[in-house]
Amino acid sequence: MNISLLDPFAALKDFPETLTRTISQPNSYSVYVKYNEQGNYLACGLSSGTILLIDNDTKQPIRILSRHTKPIQSLTWSRCGRYLLSSSRDWRVYLWDVITGGNLQGFNFHTPVWTAEFNPVNEKEFIVALFDEMPLLVDSQGAKHIIPTDINNGTAISVLKFHPNGQYIFTGSNKGVLTVIQRVPEDGSLRIVGEVKVSSSAIRNIIISPNGLKIATNSSDRIIRQYNIPSDATLDDPQTWQALEITHKYQDIVNRIQWNSIMFHPTENSEYLIASAYGSSHVIYMWETTTGSMLNILQGPEEELMDLDWNVVKCTICATGVDTGNVYLWSLVIPQRWSALAPDFVEIDENIEYQEQEDEFDFKGDEQEGRESERKRLREEAEIVIDVWTKEKRDARGNPLELGVIVPVDYSLDIAEL
Amino acid sequence: MTSSNLYTLLQHIPTEHESFTTSVQISPDSQYLATASSDKTIHIFDFKTFTLLKKLIGHKGGVNTLEWSPDSKYIASTSDDQTTKIWEIESQECLRTLTGHTYHVTTAAFSPKCNLIVTGSADEAIRVWEVQTGNSLRTLSAHSEPIAAVDLSWDGSIIASASFDGTIRIFDTETGQCVKTLVYGKVPVSNIKFSPNGKYVLATTFDNTIRLWDYQNNKVLKTLQGGKFSKYRCTAVFIQGLGQYEGMTFVASGSETGDVVIWDLNSKKVMDVLKVSEKPVLSVDEKNGILVALSVDGKLSAFSFK
């Protein structure tokens, strides 16, 4: 509710430009970051395998989720904001309840796990990409279903992504093939509906916009490719995928930068795409997804940036640093409006030569009139109908205004335990 | 006007405080009732039977206000000993003592997520505290007289403060910036409360008036008169009409006449006046059709909606 009170030129920008905060906890090295949907909490996966839940208001850890013994590989929040799914280099995937901080379920895959992700519409299911094995869909009963992909002569699947409708899965192989798998609505079985040869080198990331109409891949050939995909109706038609054409290619032609991680602006239509740069450039690139033009470069940290996330509600971008394990936050800088401190002050852009008004210092003998107008105002007040109960559903940026799942304060938590 | 139209007396609740009583609050889950007193203690009652259950002892000075956490498990109390304490109800233990103010702490408000507490003090500063660590996150210094009351909007993103310097200020919680100042005359403002939807603030001033402000547009929308507030901080609450009054909004406030005065917000008419004591009624609260009022001389009464 605060946004409408702030300077609209500063507060209503789509993306942040200034590095405003660095989160660094003693003895902790962050490798993976993920905000929940409301932007209240940031889950930080550490190299020690611990997951810290950080309160966005205080930037302090409020939960320490420890059970993994090796660096965190991936984190996803359930849409409701209560559950967190983590995968780690200890070959395990855990499901956490952030309210209690407890570990609900654990899965050992007996082989390295690349990544694991919730089904966006059903948090009882998740998909997981494994080293040298077929990717799996794990359903609510814990049963494992093989996600069919064309694994032969050394092909491996290291990335996968759910379509926002939960009915399709995209996998990316080290040979640059994007495979589209449908969950057949009749029997829930999985079948391949399309294969797209994206590049000749490995696919490192797949991202998809929340409305499901844009998909982008980050390949080892230093090019991010963006495709427009049709709406749900024709997704199961192999023709759709054969005819898929690149909408935009994002790359740094001069420096030939490799991209560590990529991310869509998490609003419905994803107007922007950001990517963290490999190597010594220490920056995040930002492009516009409709025109494909580069928009901005986020700078500040003095180290290479690895994982990214974008908090759309609070308009904050965060990234992890490779050397220190710090988490860097870029957010909006809103100038103090000094006129807010005195209601009769007006802000001006430049000095104005003061000119006295004709009647400015005239004696006003019309106190009677003043009292009369006050009485009139009081009479008019009775006609205004006020509703003090109905809450706004959206904030001034158009994001849902809701508290979401609240993680209660744990008064006994000792951060020194880290 | 003196006849009871909306509420009937349910019960006088005996209190055991040894000095002036300052604040009464019903827990958000309607399970408990808590009272604070300048005898340095807080008493917890069962909200159904009105029996005294627990006493929270630990402050070194009189307790000025108390505030339930939104999850009803904790109480924050502000005291003349310059601290704010957070108590766990179940264990009766003081979990945090927030120190930093340099004079009497007069008011406190929890954020809806329970992760922050905002306090106001007679040292003219407002402080935002992290509940988890007990550290002061930021200090808002924008008033030039003691702070009488602070409140947070339902989403926790804005803070409203009332001060004896005659101004109401609105702050952005995240940055601590003052984003708005509301002034009506230069009369001390003694109480402030956000409407449940956060669009308006209800402010009590020492000219015996309660005003409902549209703070977004710096406009007074309703002026409520009929109570007496010229010396003490008397708190007010919004009440949703029930039964035949469904759809109406009432405002109830303590008054220095020893009554609770209840207005219909839209017509601004006084609907009911409930006698509690001969001494000022400093605090009122309402949940599920039960209204409780506490006078400075320890008279605690419960009324039920007809």
Image (spheres, helix red, strand yellow):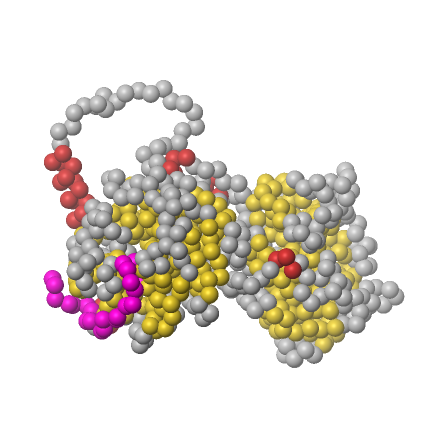
Q: Is residue A31 visible?
A: yes
* Left or right, residue B50 beside residue A94: left
* Left or right, residue A141 beside residue B5: right
Is B12 covered by the magenta stretch? yes
Residue B193 vs residue A81, the one in the foreground: B193
* Residue B156 % position (x, y): 44, 54
* Left or right, residue A293 beside residue B269: right
Task: Please state the total of marks drawn on the protein image.
Answer: 0
Q: Quadrant of the N terminus of chain B?
A: bottom left
* Residue A134 % position (x, y): 78, 70
* Residue A133 % position (x, y): 80, 70
* Left or right, residue A211 beside residue B142: right
| Residue A165, placed above or below residue A6 | below
Residue A170: quarter of image: bottom right
Residue A175: quarter of image: bottom right
At a point 79% along the width and 49% down the height, the residue shown is A221
Residue B272: quarter of image: bottom left
Is B16 covered by the magenta stretch? yes
Residue A7 vs residue B262, the one in the foreground: B262
Residue A182 vs residue A101, the one in the foreground: A101
The magenta region covers: B1-25
Q: Is residue B263 visible?
A: no
| Residue B117, placed above or below residue A152 | above
* Residue B300 % position (x, y): 25, 66
At a point 65% along the width and 40% down the height, the residue shown is A300
